[in-house]
């Protein structure tokens, strides 16, 4: 059956260069991102252990969605300098892949889990873009910080009789001198928690047409692009993998979730605490059978050992501590904002002024803007590399015929509108033009966020509109004088 080796974890493979502990960390981040936690155990009135769902505020998901939206949105544009053929081709690929919308969505995963890979591939006569999330992306042994070789895992299942079979395809991308090498290995397991035993590719018809080994020429970079959030991996200083933007704030996220869960339960139970004689919690019917008098899912009533004849019921209830919980949650959220590089008040509620807008937050503190710019450096570089990879792949497949641009010729423009007060910007550039510090063309490019050629067209339109238009009398006089001549 082509058996060569057995793997429990993918990281057990000798070519993988990252320890399993890094993927344990990614799985823990995934738990916070999904907001899925174990049920809470508690004792009810009868002293029985009961379980209830843990109610999470899931600030991890709120955080990464907010960050992704200020990094990339539908206003993002790009140009390839002095290469209209390449520019048109990549714009067409991005459009057919609905790239901006999908990239923003998957960027949330990349920010939450510490990395995201994009893998262009050919489907028919079109280039498609696959997104490879952190749990299935594995740098190889030879890598340091720049990931030029990696394995990508794809998992599928089939059914054989009454059993589910788990398949894992490992797609290795590496270099042999100038040749780009792709190796495919297939593993089969009856246990979803184990990779299993290696098989021939023909063992699963899904992968039967794949080549086990392929060598490609004329590639300058790998057929994937790895993007990781800004910041050094302080959890494993030798790992090439990135950190989640909340990796160093998980304890704060737990505090927020715990406080919110306790607040939710206190509201649900009404914070009622009633002390009753234990005899009332252990009623016996006429057949001598124990009868549970109170709801077994609540912990409101507390039984107290005492005289059987003492039927005193004491209300121990206190008011719901709404203000204290809200204050605590807001304090934890403020700590989260600081730990993740966001301006104070990004998520908090200001009692005097209400929820703050992005412009208000940035005008008070530019931390969010600085953090955004740091992440954008990595995002822009990854997108520039993606453009080159798409064109190299399309060239190899005969789908593109033209020059491959250099990284520096590919310029992405990310919309700063959420951070910009347009009136202040207009006043600033108007005064700069009046003082002779900047040309009208540059001012138009900055204020209207348009490329140079469009700014020149706008300048010409302004000049045309500024030319005096002769009145009908002036036109008649001009015509008469022309006729006299």
Image (spheres, rainbow, N blue to C red):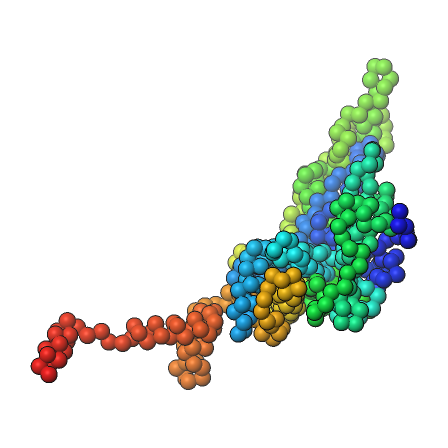
- Front-most of 240 and 86? 86
Q: Nearer the viewer, residue 301 or 394?
A: 394
- Tally the marks: 0
Q: Which residue: 84% across, 46% down? A: 188
Percent x, y of residue 37 = 76, 46
| Percent x, y of residue 14 | 88, 61
Q: Is residue 412 visible?
A: no
Where, by quadrant of the figure, is residue 340 drawn? bottom right
- Which part of the image, by quadrant, shows the C terminus? bottom left
Residue 237 % position (x, y): 81, 69
Left or right relative to 199: residue 87: left
- Residue at image position (64%, 53%) is 123
Outermost residue, top direction?
286
Task: State the residue at coordinates (75%, 50%).
Answer: 209
Q: Quadrant of residue 455?
A: bottom left
Q: Quadrant of residue 50?
A: top right
Residue 463 vertical position relative to residue 280 in the rendered view, above or below:
below
């Amino acid at each position: 059956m082509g058996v060569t080796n057995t793997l429990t974890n993918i990281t057990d493979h000798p070519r993988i260069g990252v320890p399993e502990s890094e993927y344990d960390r990614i799985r823990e981040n995934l738990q916070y991102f999904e907001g899925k936690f174990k049920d809470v155990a508690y004792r009810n009135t009868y002293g029985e252990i009961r379980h209830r769902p843990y109610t999470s505020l899931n600030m991890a998901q709120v955080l990464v969605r907010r960050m992704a939206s200020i990094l990339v949105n539908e206003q993002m544009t790009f140009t390839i300098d002095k290469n209209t053929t390449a520019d048109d081709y990549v714009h067409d690929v991005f459009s057919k892949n609905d790239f901006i919308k999908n990239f923003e969505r998957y960027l949330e995963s990349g920010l939450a889990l510490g990395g995201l890979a994009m893998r262009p591939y050919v489907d028919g006569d079109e280039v498609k873009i696959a997104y490879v999330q952190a749990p299935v992306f594995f740098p190889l042994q030879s890598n340091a910080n720049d990931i030029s070789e990696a394995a990508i895992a794809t998992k599928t299942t089939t059914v054989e009789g009454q059993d589910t079979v788990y398949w894992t395809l490992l797609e290795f991308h590496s270099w042999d001198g100038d040749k780009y090498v792709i190796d495919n290995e297939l593993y089969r397991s009856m246990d979803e928690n184990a990779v299993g035993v290696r098989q021939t590719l023909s063992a699963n018809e899904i992968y039967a047409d794949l080549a086990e080994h392929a060598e490609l020429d004329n590639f300058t970079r790998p057929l994937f692009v790895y993007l990781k959030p800004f910041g050094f991996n302080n959890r494993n200083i030798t790992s090439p993998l990135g950190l989640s933007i909340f990796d160093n704030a998980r304890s704060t996220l737990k505090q927020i979730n715990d406080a919110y869960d306790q607040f939710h339960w206190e509201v649900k139970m009404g914070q009622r605490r009633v002390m009753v004689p234990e005899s009332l919690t252990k009623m016996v019917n006429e057949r001598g059978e124990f009868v549970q008098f109170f709801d077994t899912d609540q912990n409101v009533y507390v039984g107290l050992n005492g005289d059987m004849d003492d039927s005193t019921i004491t209300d121990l209830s206190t008011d719901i501590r709404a203000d204290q919980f809200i204050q605590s949650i807001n304090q934890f959220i403020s700590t989260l904002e600081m730990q993740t590089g966001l301006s104070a008040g990004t998520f908090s509620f200001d009692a005097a002024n209400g929820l703050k807008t992005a412009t208000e937050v940035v005008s008070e503190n530019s931390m969010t803007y600085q953090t955004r710019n740091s992440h954008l450096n990595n995002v822009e570089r990854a997108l520039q590399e993606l453009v080159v990879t798409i064109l190299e792949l399309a060239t190899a497949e005969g789908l593109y015929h033209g020059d491959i641009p250099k990284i520096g010729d590919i310029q992405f423009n990310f919309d700063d509108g959420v951070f910009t007060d347009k009136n202040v910007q207009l006043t600033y550039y108007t005064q700069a033009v009046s003082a002779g510090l900047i040309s009208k063309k540059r001012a138009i490019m900055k204020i209207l966020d348009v490329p140079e050629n469009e700014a020149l067209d706008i300048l010409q339109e302004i000049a045309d509109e500024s030319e005096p238009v002769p009145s009908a009398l002036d036109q008649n006089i001009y015509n008469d004088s022309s006729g006299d001549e």
